[in-house]
Amino acid sequence: MIRRAAALVLLLAAALLVACGGGDDGPSGEPTSEPKGPVIRLGTKNFSEQFILGELYRQALVAKGFRVDLKEDVGSTEIIDAALTIGKLDMYPEYVGVLLSEIAGQKRRPRSAREAYTRAQRFVRSRDQRLLDATPFSNSNALAVKPATARRLGLRSVGDLDDAPGRVEIAAPPEFRTRFEGLLGLRELYGLRNIDVVPTAIGEQYDALDDGLVDVAAVFTTDGQLNAGTYELLDDEKGLFSYQNVAPVVSRKMLDAAPGLADALDAVSAKLTTRAMQAMNAAVDLRGDRPAAVARRFLREHGLV
Amino acid sequence: MLKKEPKWLEAGGSGTVRRTLKRSITARTLVVGIALAALFGAVFLVLVLAIQQQRQAGRLALRSQEAITAGTDLEKSLINMENGLRGYVASGRERLLEPFDAGRRAYPRQVTVLTRLVADEPSQQAAVRRIASDIDDYVALWALPLVQLAGERLPSARSVIATGTGRRRLDALRAQFADLFVRERAVARERELRAEQRSDVAVGIGVAGVALVVLLAIGMWQYLRRAILRPVGVVAGAAEAVAAGDLSVRVPAAREDELGSLARSFNAMTASLERSQAELRRRTAELERSNAELEQYAQMASHDLQAPLATISMYVELLRRRAAESGDEQAAELLGGIHASSGWMRSLIRDLLHLSRVGRGELERETLDTNELLGQVLDNLAGPIRDRGAEIVAGSLPAVQGDGRQLAQVFQNLIGNAIKFSDEEHPHVTVEGVVEGDVVAFLVRDNGIGIDPAQIERIFRPFERLHGEARYEGTGVGLAICRRIVEHHGGEISAEGRPGVGSTFRFTVPRAPGPAAIERPPAPQATMAQ
């Protein structure tokens, strides 16, 4: 009887202790085998093509053993350039023409892609940055209209807008209003005075066009939407929308700190033709694929990863 | 009685441990006590733990509230930054940048505080890390570049604001905050719930523990009752039986513990008592028989001796008369001596017979009026009282219960002695009676020759005489008879005195039953003097 009672007491005490004690589960460490070298802060602007370019460069660099911190959707040219200049980014892909007109503020139109690149390179070097090799593709600005509108208003080229009745509303990203390769250039170079800008998010110009809210949309020549032939581009006979090949702008400091960085990026840039870029843009914008997946597919196809 | 073996005697298990434990009540009580104390300690410990955990849960619940507050502060800093930024870009006035700078200075510390407060929830900690990183990005990749741009080209900065990048960043961050708060509130609720549960558990443990301790205490009490009190009760019952005179009682003594040895000692004691009692009875019976034989013998002897003695006395008297008639004076004188001696012998035998009769057989107990009794005694003693000119003073005496003839004998012997053993011209005797509880104490006081205190014991022995036969007549049996009668009544008799001053005899007799036990002061009532 005593032994039974004692056993009961012990059992009870143990049960109570177990009931009250909480179980701790230790953190399960995930194995990290980070490559060495400085972390490259890679920024991209705020639209699909930039997201794809960012993933292309990031994945290619990671495959080469670099450490990359991809900062997507930093913003428009003005803001991402400021971020690079004040040292918050190490690189981003920029359009040569935009660089020249919007950042360098050069209003003189380049006569060739080569001239544009050379001038842009000269400019960024003055800011302790380097322009790496440019892509074969050029994503120029352009003005798109629906074929029906073109017929109705007799539009063939940008200059024809001057003859359009009443005011012409152009759907465009907000920065279009303050850019030379935008409203400013249209006024200055083409002398257009009847133009208003309807600000839209990038990519939504096509919706505005489709919905009949506007007659004209400011677009990019590599937009996937232009693949289908449902839109016509107005002829830029005065060369306002210049050569917009993409070239990574990299701080010199990072180039020095990460040897082989330029080669790795150049290898990717060399493969980016207009057709390839348009196809990838279409995959993201029209099919809804993820930029990372699209980029990975492309890099695999071209043996870059 | 005790034919049936009590349950506690039934042998339990066969294990050695069990046997050892069974052996000693001390050990068993100790084990049960330690078990109780251990249980109590365990319950107490568990209760303390439960309360601690409840406290901990409460603290955590409070921490969630603090985390939400800290998060709100951080969000405010963020909104301040954006507002400052927008104000600056819209106006171009650097003064308006002040909220931005303040927010930028404040937020890293706020992030640290918030991170510490959500340290217990890894998912929340990750969320805070994400928020912190996004704020860093907001500052590094949006706010600072924008400030830079605004400083260089204000219109460009304004158009950049219009792109909505900053608003998107801010909205995304605020969504993260909202999500963080929702989850932190859920965490807080869960923690409060846990605190309540812990509290319930603590209360439950407390109640269950107390109930268990009480149950075990009751169990222990039952056990003690069964294992100790009941067996002790059996022995106590047996002891009562012994006290009531039943020495044949035995208690079961099969146990091997202290109670077993108690039972064995008890049994040994009763056995010994029984033997002693049997022996005593045997001896008493023997004594009674020999006593009775002796008394019968004495009675028979004295009775049988009387007749021949009377014949001898008669013939001697006859011879003495003839000798006197024949003128033989010498022979007559001798024969006279023989005659006197045989007379003395006859009174000796008579007293002996008397003594042997007193104190035998059943007493006749009746309520007696002592005053009346004393009156008869004084009538009987009228001759000596008159001869000696004695004065007898008696107060009102309480009624007693006893044999009237025998008690009268006591008074007669004592008063007679008082008159007899006095050289005074007028012997003076007082008789008093005082109620003392269940008895009446009588005092017979005189102014006679007194008694040597060293001789007092002797005077109550039969045929003991302190004084010469010639001076005071009597066989010396009177006081012995008095003692026998008083003791036969259950009383005591004693004497005190000093030679030449007088003596006092005191004896007690059961008082008459009933409420009439009124003690009256001894006031002179009957006086006899000649």
Image (cartoon, helix red, strand yellow):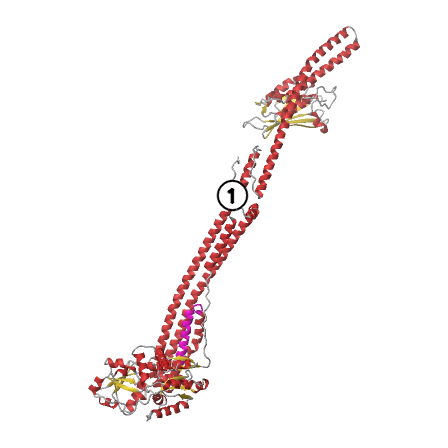
Q: Is residue B52 above or below residue B155?
A: above
Other residues around mark 1 within 10 Å, as few (<14) / some (14–19) / many (≥20): some
- In the image, B340: left or right of A100? right
- Residue B438: x %, y % from top left: 58, 29
Residue at the extreme left of the image, as rendered: A152
Frontmost residue, B342 versus A75? A75
Q: Residue furthest top?
A: B326
Which quadrant: the C terminus of chain B?
top right
* Secondary structure predominantly adopted by residues drawn in magenta: helix
The residue type indicated by label 1 comes to Arg
In this image, A287 relative to B45: left or right? left
Secondary structure beneath label 1: helix
Across and down, in percent, residue B364 comes to 58, 22
- Closest to the observer, B23 or B281: B23
How many badges with numbers are in the image? Answer: 1
Q: Which residues are magenta?
A: B117-140
Indicate the quadrant where residue B345 lies: top right
The picture places residue A84, in percent across and down from the top left corner, at: 40, 84
Seen from the viewer's position, the closer of residues B151 and B206 is B206
Q: Nearer the viewer, residue B234 or A11?
A: A11
Q: Is residue B219 visible?
A: yes
Residue B516 image point, x, y percent: 55, 27
Q: Give the residue number, with chain letter if any, for mark 1.
A: B226
Q: Quadrant of residue A44?
A: bottom left
Asked which quadrant contains residue A38, the reply is bottom left
Q: Is residue B97 visible?
A: no
Mark 1 belongs to chain: B
Instruction: Residue A290: say if magenta.
Output: no
Residue at 79% across, 9% down = B329
**Where is B151 relative to B526, above or below?**
below
**Residue B133, magenta (yes or no):** yes
